[in-house]
Amino acid sequence: MQNDDATRAPRHRVLIIGGGFGGLSAARALARAPVDVTLVDRRNHHLFQPLLYQVATAGLSAPSIAAPLRFILREQANAFVYMDEALEIDRTRRVVRFAHGEREYDTLIVATGAGHAYFGHDEWEKYAPGLKTLEDAFHIRRRILLAFENAERETDPVKRQAWLNFVIVGGGATGVELSGTLAEIARHTLPREFRNSEPRNANILLVEAGPRVLPAFDQDLSEKARKQLAKLGVQVRTGQAVTSIDAHGVELGEERLVARTVLWAAGVAASPLGALLGVPLDRAGRVQVNPDLTIPDDPHVFVIGDLASVSTDGKPVPGVAPAAKQMGAYAGEVIADRVQGKLPRAPFRYKDDGSLATIGRMAAVAQFGKVKLSGIVAWWVWLIAHVYFLIGFRNRLVVLMDWASSYWTYQRHARIVQGAISRDDPPR
Amino acid sequence: MQNDDATRAPRHRVLIIGGGFGGLSAARALARAPVDVTLVDRRNHHLFQPLLYQVATAGLSAPSIAAPLRFILREQANAFVYMDEALEIDRTRRVVRFAHGEREYDTLIVATGAGHAYFGHDEWEKYAPGLKTLEDAFHIRRRILLAFENAERETDPVKRQAWLNFVIVGGGATGVELSGTLAEIARHTLPREFRNSEPRNANILLVEAGPRVLPAFDQDLSEKARKQLAKLGVQVRTGQAVTSIDAHGVELGEERLVARTVLWAAGVAASPLGALLGVPLDRAGRVQVNPDLTIPDDPHVFVIGDLASVSTDGKPVPGVAPAAKQMGAYAGEVIADRVQGKLPRAPFRYKDDGSLATIGRMAAVAQFGKVKLSGIVAWWVWLIAHVYFLIGFRNRLVVLMDWASSYWTYQRHARIVQGAISRDDPPR
């Protein structure tokens, strides 16, 4: 299963598992190094996760925020891309076993990120889907659109309202984005199209267990976000934890909220690949790495991105895209230095470039050190930053076009439910 | 389950099953009639099937060729849209039973079209997917893209070539479009991105049991289509029927062709809903309708589109989009006339506006009565006609943009494989 170009002398082999922000940035950092880079992912595409909520809410189509990994790396002659699933890591033999064969490495970079966590309640997943992959986004899109379809078909007013009640669990960036956009859909996109039901009667409820939404931001911006959500029509409950979820609603301790659609934006769990390394994990399942992002006692293995637990300047590095990119670039540079016999680098240091979260139509918050923005100005900064970081000219153009048209017409062009409705739709 | 607007006097209720070209056109023809129109489809969208092969070959994303039915009919105040699956038709009680409840009708229009047919070999479907729905298109896209991924990962040259061999069964419009586009992908889109395998080594084989490709066109245009296919790199075999299909290839009588990817574009079968009407069907399962598109002995039920078997001017009406649209409009007008007490119309008459089939990059054939076109001129006519008939300004713009960019760059932006690869990918 090795690269079968027999004409070259053997070179240092860097194997990267995961083509997210971390893995891709590591591969790119090695472009000019005298190494062979092999990037393996279970999927064929890199996903621009910060805009995934737009696919889930029918504003963007999937190809606008995803690009094939081998397309992205096509000009990098030392990069090989394979689609495969890692099953086992043998650090003694320096071999990774994949579903379709083994691959040897000289240096391994594990960058498989994180998935959802249901705090020990995996049975909630069926009723409250989370948002990490394109398939998750399609599933959530289907659930949202079918809820309005079911309300239109339902003749019992109580049952109909249950289809128009939405609960979003988790007040971080994803929960805020989903609930704000959902409110816009219910109030502006759908109303004229329904005859029996009234989408404007939808209740969008955002539940956060902690004391405020967007806890990664300063207190005053959380308060502003809450106000902007209220203006969009989202009810926010903070300090209340969900204790139960089923097909008909959620429970917050003693209180029961009836809602046929519940979306999960509360917890993340590190990729199970971390546990295959046989090194200490933190409570969230992340690998506690050395200051140079290698794992304890094995300088040949790096862990980066959301799967890595590391602190710089005394603060834990957050699980966000810029941190994963910085870790990937750092790991790539350390490996390039080593192969070229240079002195070891200083430890990894996270540079906080600021935080942005969008809330809905022309509403967002932004924090860059001491500079804080909210409302329409923050929204423009958010838009420009996100379009800038998208891969590919076509995508930037189409996303801008979709945004402009969605702004003027309130329409969302990707309102396509995949698959036919069935007798078991919705799940009972 | 009736429309619960209790303030209006009861009106003639027209129930339409199926939101394709036929059903939608019937609904629109009833816009100004004093009737209630209820359109029910298992899916939430109308699909522009003539461009479905572009989704299957990663040139367009799904929302470019699909639009929610209730969005299309939003301005038509007498139209109600529901997402549901028809299970049973009771013509005595004039009731249709759906998965989520019953609906009464005064007049019923059945417009559920056709699916694939495997000529009694349903076991072939697993190995040779057909192309009728968006899910079919995603499945075929996945199969095509994974074939090249598997070739890149494969080290055995014989097994690798098997992944680069593609057989398309059926030389009608869909088979010609799929094979021409696949040849372009292999020769122009992918080459620079692979390191171990050579996409240019792909063999694209189009197999047609009849004597020529595009049998709906005149002989000389079939010959021109064959030459254009050959120029694009597609091998065409006519007069050879597939006798067996499995995971590793197809058999044409004594001859075995090794190919890990087989696509089905050979046969269609009428929707099973026709059989629920309890009237005579033709060999393809279509309902033999009266000259006014009603079924024998029941003037309250119309069957239109691909599910209807009817001849006009002594020739069978073909199963194409313009025919379905014309039947839908006719049925709508007959119903409007009846409700308003007008005299019966003349029988349905199919007006042949000509035929168009695209073959690949700047290659197509067209036939309008005695006017025949081929090559680049036919391709432009094809392009303009298809963009014109697409629903929505945004879609027209984006499709044109995608075509222009695909022409200049040879890129196809929708090369996204949904879902992760697994141990059982490909099916064994």
Image (cartoon, coloured by chain):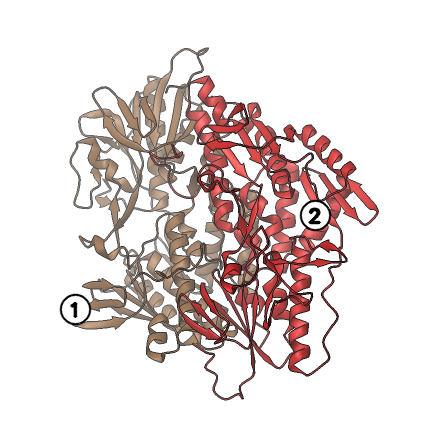
Chain colours: A red, B brown
Determine which quarter of the picture holds residue B365: bottom left
Q: Residues within 10 Å of mark 1 (few under 14, many from 20)?
A: few
Q: Quarter of the image for the C terminus of chain B: give it.
A: bottom left
Q: Quarter of the image for the N terminus of chain B: give it.
A: top left
Rounded to the nearest angstrom, the CA distance separating label 2 from label 1 is 60 Å
Of the pair B175 and B40, the residue shown nearer to us: B40
Q: Position of residue B240 (x, y in %)?
A: 21, 67
Element marked by disc 1: loop
- Residue drawn at x 64%, y 28% as measured from the top left: A233
Q: Is residue B75 visible?
A: no
Determine which quarter of the picture holds residue B111: top left
Amino acid type indicated by mark 1: Gly
Q: Does A267 appear above or below B145?
A: above
Q: Which residue is mark 2?
A: A383
User: Residue B253: which numbered mark, if any?
Assistant: 1
Of the pair A307 and A223, the residue shown nearer to us: A307
Q: Does B153 appear above or below B351?
A: below
Q: Position of residue A36 (x, y in %)?
A: 56, 78
Q: In this figure, what is the number of numbered marks?
A: 2
Q: Position of residue A39 (x, y in %)?
A: 53, 69
Judged left or right of residue B339, residue A202 is right
Q: Does B345 appear above or below B325?
A: above
Residue at mark 1: chain = B
Of the pair B239 and A384, the residue shown nearer to us: A384
